[in-house]
Image (cartoon, rainbow, N blue to C red):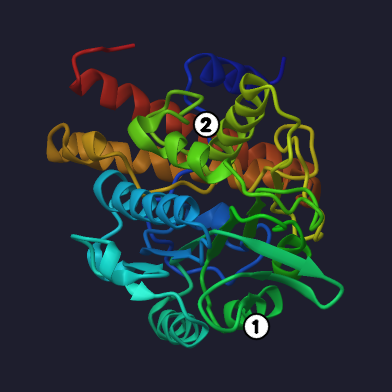
Amino acid sequence: MSLVTGMCAGLLAAGLLSAGLFSMRPTDPPQRSVDPPGMMETGTASGLQYGLVIAGIGGEKKYVDRNLDWARGFRDVLSSDYGFSEDRLTLMVEDPAGVGGFPAVKSTLAEIRRVLAALADLIRPGDDLFILLIGHGSATDAGARLNIPGPDLRADMLRDALEEIGARYTVVVNGASSSAPFIEALSGPGRVIVTATKSGAERLSTVFPEHLLAALKAKAGDLDKDGRISVLESFVYARNKTSEWYAGEGLLATEHPLLDDNGDGRGTREPGPGGTDGMLAGRVYFGRRSTAAVKSGSPEERALQDGMEALRWQIDELKARKDRVDPGEYTARMEELLIELARVTRRLRTLEGNPP
């Protein structure tokens, strides 16, 4: 067994090679790409995270109320549990007066364009943008859209607006009906696109947003129990719970969530190891770090935690680039990273009173 293989096995057994992390800004912020160049050398970025929650029209009162509840829920959990600050989180709904307690903007096309233009001015290459769409959608030969007050938000309109935003990563979750065509329209390097449906023909109301919200609340979607939730984890949790909901109701499933993150414009139901999608989604997290991790330990312990996160990110980035890196360079670089991670981990455990 080679040194690298042996060390990988040992660290994996110790639970150290978890998915990539977010907390440190590289010296040279990368431009957007599927695997951002330079991350192998510089580690994670510590840019800001911006959130935009858009709820469209509901029609019947029960859908109006449900859309509002989900929108408020996403806005609340991103703020309270994932560290999205008030000035970087925008809530847009059909009737802002009904929100209560939160600042909100009416989800008209003009306002959406204004907010996206403002984000284009604010967001820098190390920052990330999360957009959640809720409500009723439709899809025709002319394209897919989210039904909002007044003219609808078309997928191509959102695509054009996103082209002006220089985020490191952009995550778009369209939880509306007929949302699948948004994948082809929005897919691209550095983007994770999630939809509630597998085609534009799935036109009935969706429950996927409810289960995605549940994934974020109380860290229910933390499948690997590392104290945080990746976009991939939240998708898998919500996809499974959506299927279970239909089975429990004795109904034929009318929505089949998809995820695309490799830029090919084709979503998959089963992203993850061995699949075509899931690599990026597994490294993009809601929030930078858990609140407990930020507040725990001495200054030295917190610095070591940051260092571990940077090293884990670099390991994940290197693994993602394995097929495009010289084998000798890959082995040497991986060995360096694993040795340093072991050193930092040993020091942190010693400080915490749990020496290896």
Q: Splitting the image into 4 quarters, where does residue 137 fall? A: bottom right
Using the numbered discs, state the Cα–Cα distance from disc 1 to disc 2 in whole angstroms: 41 Å
Give neighbour class at mark 1: few <14, some 14-19, many 20+ (Cα, 10 Å): few
Whether residue 319 is visible? yes
Q: Nearer the viewer, residue 326 or 272?
A: 272
Identify the element where label 2 is drawn. Answer: helix
Quadrant of the drawing holding the C terminus: top left
x and y, in percent, of residue 191 in the image:
63, 61
Question: Residue 37 — which label?
Answer: none
Instruction: Look at 48% across and 73% down and name the residue there.
Output: 125
Outermost residue, right direction?
141
Relative image position of residue 275 (x, y in whole percent): 79, 37
Residue at (45, 67) in percent of width and height: 126
In the rendered image, which residue does mark 2 sit on? 338
Q: Please tell me whether mark 1 sits on a helix, a strand or a loop.
A: helix
Q: Which residue is denoted by mark 1 in the rendering? A: 160
Please state which amino acid type lies under the numbered disc 2: Leu
* Depth order, front residue of 35/304: 35
Residue drawn at (28%, 53%) of the image? 79
